[in-house]
């Protein structure tokens, strides 16, 4: 009974957000219940179409390159047009394309349709991220991003394992389910997200979000040196992090054949279970730790998880132990990055700056995947993982530098970011001591 009470008290930390935050939370659950295509993309290209690791990386890079102008367009639209409408249009096109993929035989046409769906999702991405920042006060941003991330992973607990089961003989059904799930989420947003007026910020730290209407996005970015460094750090991190869906499934397929898809599906589901269990805990326990500190912890845990995976490659139980460390790092990173960006970007430039940062990260990620894929084809596992660990280590070192630079340029964020202990977390502490 005490355990149930403590769990309820931890979830109370998400109270007090705007209604639209909760709608987006439930929409994320529904969307990700049907997220069965992208987690299996590497295995589809590898096992179903017989494409080499290097060429898989080239195909994924082509998709990323095509999405870059779409993301920039989405960022510009997000600062000028109704963000809800951008999301609805992007989702509607994606639904149609995924259902078409399920009805057509698997071929390069299918891959093209998936990439086209990704382009429209890239258009809506900056609007989605900017909308969350708009409707959430600065003091609640970490909770809002934490809740959205929690919803995504509640939905993802089932879909990767189910897609692993469908992979061999019913892959077409995975496409249909993805389309239907996105469609349900789209309807939820259409009918229930109504108030998208930006909140009026208060407090000294809000000065960093003050609108700069007559300045270009490049001027604003150049004036924010820590944000530029953050972009490089995040790009390196995601280049390494993305090997969870690129290099890791390739390794599982190499060691375990067709069974690698099911193993990878269960590992991915465990990733989501850990997120659901630990995100509320970490949000409450580490609320006093600044975003930059969370970045450092997240990268250290990512490196530890990959090291365990590589050192015990072929030993299936080690995959599940490694994913625990990996996912803890992922949680810390998620709690840090959304709030970090939104607290340091002028409200007038959120959509454009987020799209520019996303494109910069996408370029490095694509080039990195091509390098990893080519090295994997030529030299095997050791060379590829050496590149991955180097990128992760460099991201960790630069994160330590960012702490000093960020404190210098954004001092107000370090003066007032020690809120009083929430009632829910105080109750947990008292009950634990008794």
Image (spheres, rainbow, N blue to C red):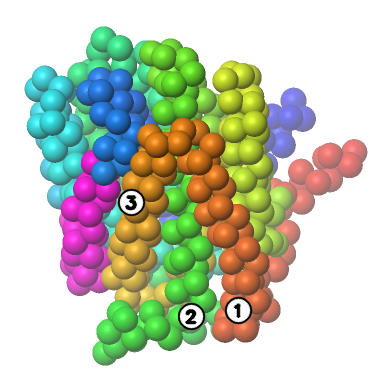
Q: CA distance from mark 2 to mark 3?
A: 24 Å
Residue 73 appears in the picture as rendered: yes
The C terminus: image quadrant: top right
Magenta part of the chain: 59-88
Q: Quadrant of residue 28?
A: top left
What's the residue at 41%, 64% (across, down)? 133
* Image coords of residue 286 (percent x, y): 69, 54
Q: Residue at x 81, y 46 (%)?
A: 429
Comes first in the chain, label 3 or label 1:
3
> Is the magenta region chiefly helix, strand or loop?
helix
In this figure, what is the number of numbered marks?
A: 3
Mark 2 Cα-neighbour bin, 10 Å: few <14, some 14–19, many ≥20: some
In the figure, is residue 357 to the left or right of 184?
Answer: right
- Quote the CA–CA distance across marks 3 and 1: 28 Å
Residue 384 x/y as whole percent: 48, 41
Residue indicated by mark 1: 405
- Mark nearer the viewer, 2 or 3: 3
In the image, residue 168 lies at what x, y percent? Answer: 30, 12
Query: Is 274 situated left or right of 185 in this image?
Result: right
Q: Is residue 395 magenta?
A: no
Report helix, strand or loop for mark 1. Answer: helix
Q: Rate crowding at label 3 as few (under 14), some (14 to 19) or many (20 or more) other CA atoms within 10 Å.
A: many
Residue that badge 2 annotates: 225
- Mark 1–mark 2 CB contact (< 8 Å): yes
User: Residue at horizontal 62%, vertical 46%?
Assistant: 303
Q: Earlier in the sequence, mark 2 or mark 3?
A: 2
Q: Which mark is residue 366?
A: 3
């Amino acid at each position: 009974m005490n355990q149930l009470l403590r769990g309820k008290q931890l979830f109370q930390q998400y109270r007090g957000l705007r209604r639209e935050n909760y709608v987006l939370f439930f929409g994320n659950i529904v969307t990700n219940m049907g997220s069965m295509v992208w987690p299996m993309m590497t295995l589809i290209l590898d096992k179903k179409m017989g494409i080499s690791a290097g060429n898989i990386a080239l195909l994924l890079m082509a998709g990323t390159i095509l999405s870059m102008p779409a993301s920039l367009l989405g960022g510009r639209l997000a600062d000028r047009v109704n963000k809800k409408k951008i999301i609805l249009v992007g989702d509607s096109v994606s639904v149609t394309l995924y259902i078409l993929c399920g009805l057509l035989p698997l071929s390069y046409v299918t891959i093209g349709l998936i990439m086209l769906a990704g382009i429209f999702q890239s258009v809506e991405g900056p609007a989605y991220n900017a909308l969350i920042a708009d409707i959430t006060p600065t003091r609640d941003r970490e909770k809002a991003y934490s809740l959205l991330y929690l919803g995504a992973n509640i939905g993802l607990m089932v879909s990767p394992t189910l897609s692993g089961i469908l992979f061999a003989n019913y892959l077409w059904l995975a496409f249909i389910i993805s389309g239907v799930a996105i469609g349900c989420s789209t309807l939820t947003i259409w009918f229930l997200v109504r108030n998208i007026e930006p909140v009026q910020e208060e407090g000294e730290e809000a000065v960093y979000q003050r609108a700069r209407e007559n300045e270009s996005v490049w001027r604003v970015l150049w004036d924010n040196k820590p944000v530029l460094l953050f972009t490089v750090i995040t790009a390196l991190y995601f280049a390494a992090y993305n090997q969870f869906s690129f290099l890791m499934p390739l390794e599982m397929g190499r060691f375990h054949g067709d069974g690698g898809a099911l193993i990878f599906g269960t590992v991915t589901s465990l990733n989501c279970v850990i997120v659901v269990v630990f995100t509320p805990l970490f949000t409450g326990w580490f609320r006093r730790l600044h975003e930059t500190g969370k970045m450092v912890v997240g990268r250290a845990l990512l490196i530890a998880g990959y090291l365990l995976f590589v050192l015990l490659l072929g030993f299936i139980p080690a995959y599940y132990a490694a994913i625990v460390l990996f996912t803890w790092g992922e949680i810390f990173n998620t709690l840090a990055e959304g709030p970090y960006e939104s607290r340091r970007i002028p409200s007038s430039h959120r959509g454009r700056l987020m799209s520019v940062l996303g494109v910069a990260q996408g370029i490095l990620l694509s080039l990195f995947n091509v390098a990893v894929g080519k090295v994997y084809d030529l030299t095997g596992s050791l060379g590829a993982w050496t590149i991955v660990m180097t990128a992760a280590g460099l991201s960790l070192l630069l994160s330590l530098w960012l702490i000093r630079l960020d404190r210098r340029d954004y001092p107000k964020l370090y003066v007032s970011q020690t809120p009083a202990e929430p009632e829910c977390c105080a109750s947990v502490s008292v009950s634990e001591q008794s």
